[in-house]
Image (cartoon, rainbow, N blue to C red):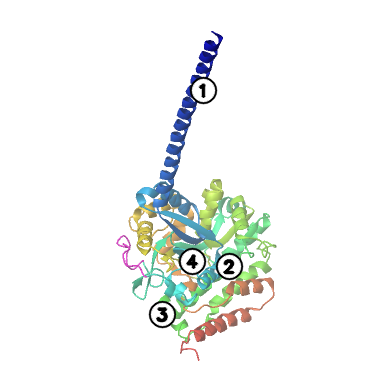
């Protein structure tokens, strides 16, 4: 009997072990199925991401503002329907950024797309036009041909680039509350009135005119207005004036008003109308000073208003603008929107043109413009301009605008921004600054084997 019970007990234990094994195997199988399903989902998602190609682009930090942020976010959200992603890398702006761009071309470390000053600049100031792809299948029907100016987007009758951003206008940006506190009810319309404003502002303890000399490119802005006067006095069109400059028939040493504007910019320092620490003060600090009212005026392009409105929205409505009144007739300086080109490093040029088609479209341009109002070249784009833009734009519509002089030259003129800083600091005299502009231009023309320079 005991043997029978022992056998029965052994049988029960054996059956229990089998049942446990089956259950464990079943659970393991279920877990494996769930894990495999999860892995399949992950694999499927990864494959989906991998199926959407990424195009790389490089731009300058001072060009990457709310417009690019909005458009970049839109592209990320709609990548599947658009058929691409856009990875934007940002580098320093100004002269430092230009040198970085040249270095990238020299080393071949290029993105698919590049936002810069256009094919003419890439040809004459960097010598890299052969690294830029002519665009064959990009639709520009939403633009007027005369807007796609020679050198900026079309070069040698070939489309190389599409516009991105708004037309920039250079002027004096001022804090209206500070003007009111100083008893200034109207903006100055001549140089004497401008100096009178500065004196009134100085009396109430604010910086009349802010210089951001640590970012040397900003120091040039006041001097641009002098060149406008030289073009005006020559009786030539802007294009004809620069044709003479670019063929050694006219020189910087003959640009008397440009020279005088440089001298006048230093006189502002000598009169105590400029922040004493201007050599170490930055572009960002200028925005803060103008927004907070510790400075009354700042000379720069409309892009500075975009920066202030983005960082200090409560101050945006306090900012107005006017043309620097150096002469009897004054012009705002205009600069065309940045140009996006495709480099020869773009392996899928069909995809590259697809991206450029989208960026040039009214859909993309409107997204950009809604986030960053301005003056856009696409005829279908509309936006309400802030007062600081509208004032200068009204002057442009009256014919009181001239393209900034630096867009006219074929050959680079050297490190003017550095020489100007040296002059303002007292380390160089005005004649040295002007002579270097001519000699550096001549050196670059000779290096290009231009027979107009021997």
- Local SS, label 2: helix
Mark 1–mark 3 distance (CA, rounded to whole Å): 99 Å
Residue at x 46%, y 26% (from the top left corner)? 22
Chain part drawn in magenta: 134-147
Residue at x 48%, y 24% (from the top left corner)? 18
Give whichever of discs 1 and 3 has the lower sequence position: 1
Q: Which mark is residue 17?
A: 1
Residue 365 appears at what percent x and percent y?
A: 39, 55
Mark 4–mark 3 distance (CA, rounded to whole Å): 35 Å
Give whichever of discs 1 and 2 has the lower sequence position: 1
Mark 4 sits on what residue?
110
Give whichever of discs 2 and 3 has the lower sequence position: 2
Neighbor class of circle 2 (other Cα within 10 Å; few <14, some 14-19, many 20+) is: few
Mark 1–mark 2 distance (CA, rounded to whole Å): 76 Å
Residue 31 appears at what percent x and percent y?
A: 47, 32
Residue at x 47%, y 82% (from the top left corner)? 245
User: Compared with residue 201, is residue 76 higher up or lower down, i.e. above or below?
Assistant: above
Task: Tell which of 238 and 416 is nearer to you.
Answer: 416
Mark 3 sits on what residue?
240
Residue 114 appears at what percent x and percent y?
A: 46, 64
Q: Which mark is residue 156?
A: none
């Amino acid at each position: 009997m005991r043997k029978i019970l022992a056998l029965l007990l052994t049988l029960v234990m054996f059956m229990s072990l089998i049942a446990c094994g089956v259950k464990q195997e079943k659970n393991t199988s279920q877990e494996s199925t769930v894990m495999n399903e999860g892995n399949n989902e992950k694999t499927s998602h990864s494959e989906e991401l991998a199926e959407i190609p990424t195009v790389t682009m490089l731009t300058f930090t001072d060009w990457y503002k709310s417009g690019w942020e909005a458009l970049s976010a839109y592209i990320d959200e709609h990548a599947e329907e658009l058929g691409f992603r856009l990875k934007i890398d940002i580098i320093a702006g100004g002269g430092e950024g230009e040198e970085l761009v040249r270095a990238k071309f020299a080393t071949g470390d290029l993105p698919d797309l590049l936002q810069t000053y256009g094919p003419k600049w890439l040809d004459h100031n960097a010598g890299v036009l052969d690294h830029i792809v002519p665009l064959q299948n990009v639709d520009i029907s939403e633009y007027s041909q005369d807007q796609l100016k020679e050198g900026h987007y079309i070069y040698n009758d070939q489309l190389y680039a599409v516009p991105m951003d708004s037309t920039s206008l250079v002027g004096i940006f001022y804090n209206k509350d500070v003007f009111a506190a100083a008893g200034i009810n109207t903006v100055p319309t001549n140089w004497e009135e401008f100096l009178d404003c500065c004196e009134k502002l100085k009396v109430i303890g604010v910086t009349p005119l802010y210089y951001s000399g640590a970012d040397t490119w900003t120091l040039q802005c006041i001097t641009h207005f002098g060149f406008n006067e030289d073009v005006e006095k020559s009786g030539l069109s802007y294009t004809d004036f620069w044709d003479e400059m670019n063929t050694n028939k006219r020189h910087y040493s003959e640009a008397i008003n440009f020279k005088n504007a440089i001298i006048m910019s230093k006189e502002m320092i000598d009169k105590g109308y400029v922040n004493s620490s201007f050599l170490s003060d930055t572009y960002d600090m200028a925005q803060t000073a103008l927004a907070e009212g510790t400075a009354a005026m700042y000379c720069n392009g409309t892009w500075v208003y975009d920066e202030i409105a983005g960082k200090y929205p409560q101050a945006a409505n306090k900012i107005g603008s006017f043309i620097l009144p150096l002469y009897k007739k004054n012009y705002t300086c205009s600069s065309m929107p940045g140009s996006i080109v495709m480099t020869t490093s773009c392996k899928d040029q069909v995809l590259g043109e697809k991206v450029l088609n989208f960026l040039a479209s009214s859909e993309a341009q409107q997204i950009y413009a809604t986030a960053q109002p301005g003056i856009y070249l696409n005829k279908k784009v509309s936006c309400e301009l802030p007062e600081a833009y509208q004032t200068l734009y009204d002057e442009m519509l009256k014919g009181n605008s001239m393209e900034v002089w630096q867009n006219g030259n074929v050959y680079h003129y050297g490190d003017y921004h550095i020489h100007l800083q040296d002059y303002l600091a007292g380390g160089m005299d005005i004649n040295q600054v002007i002579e270097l502009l001519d000699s550096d231009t001549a050196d670059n023309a000779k290096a290009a084997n231009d027979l107009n320079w021997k």
